[in-house]
Image: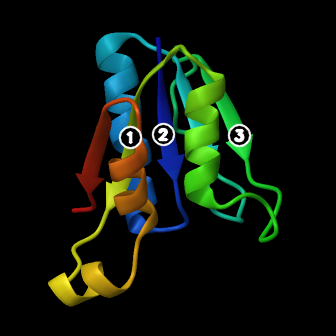
Amino acid sequence: MSILIAVTDSEEGQAALDAGVFEARTFREPMIVLNLGLRDLDLSAIPDSIPLQKIDRRGKDDQDPVDLVLHTIETDPEISRVVIGVRRRSPVGKALIGSISQRVLLASPIPVLAVKAT
């Protein structure tokens, strides 16, 4: 089994990465880091003892981030859960504008661990 961590260019993305590392250490599972941002992701703080695979988006014209998360889950049956970062949003914001995290929570066929940045 492995843990898929969806990382965005934000505080919430860093919170997801930190929580994913904790999960991987605790359950001794490999990590798949899905870089949903368009910047290079610094993974140097992740211990060498955790097996790691990194998947990068190719640019703005690449797949929709949610579709990329779901496609990764579909193509790798070893993924046991997804870790995502979430932020507080108002009820109006939730109703009018969908978010990547909300769409992943609703569409994922496997458990999702949603973490907030502190």
User: Quadrant of residue 60 in the image?
Assistant: bottom right
Q: Given contact means CB atoms under 8 Å apart, are the residues at marks 1 and 2 in contact?
A: yes
Location of residue 91 in the rendering, given as x and y in whole percent from the top left corner: 16, 83
Location of residue 90 in the rendering, given as x and y in whole percent from the top left corner: 18, 84
Location of residue 3 in the rendering, given as x and y in whole percent from the top left corner: 45, 26
Residue position marked by numbered label 3 in the rendering: 55
- As displayed, is residue 47 above or below residue 87? above
Three-letter amino acid code of the residue under disc 2:
Ile
On screen, residue 88 versus residue 102, left or right, reads left
Distance (Cα) linking label 1 and label 2:
5 Å
Secondary structure beneath disc 3?
strand
Q: Earlier in the sequence, mark 3 or mark 2?
A: 2
User: Quadrant of residue 70 in the image?
Assistant: top right
Residue position marked by numbered label 1 in the rendering: 83
Q: Residue at x 75, y 54 (%)?
A: 57
Residue position marked by numbered label 2 in the rendering: 5
Q: Residue at x 55, y 66 (%)?
A: 9
Secondary structure beneath disc 2?
strand
Nearer the observer, 12 or 48: 12
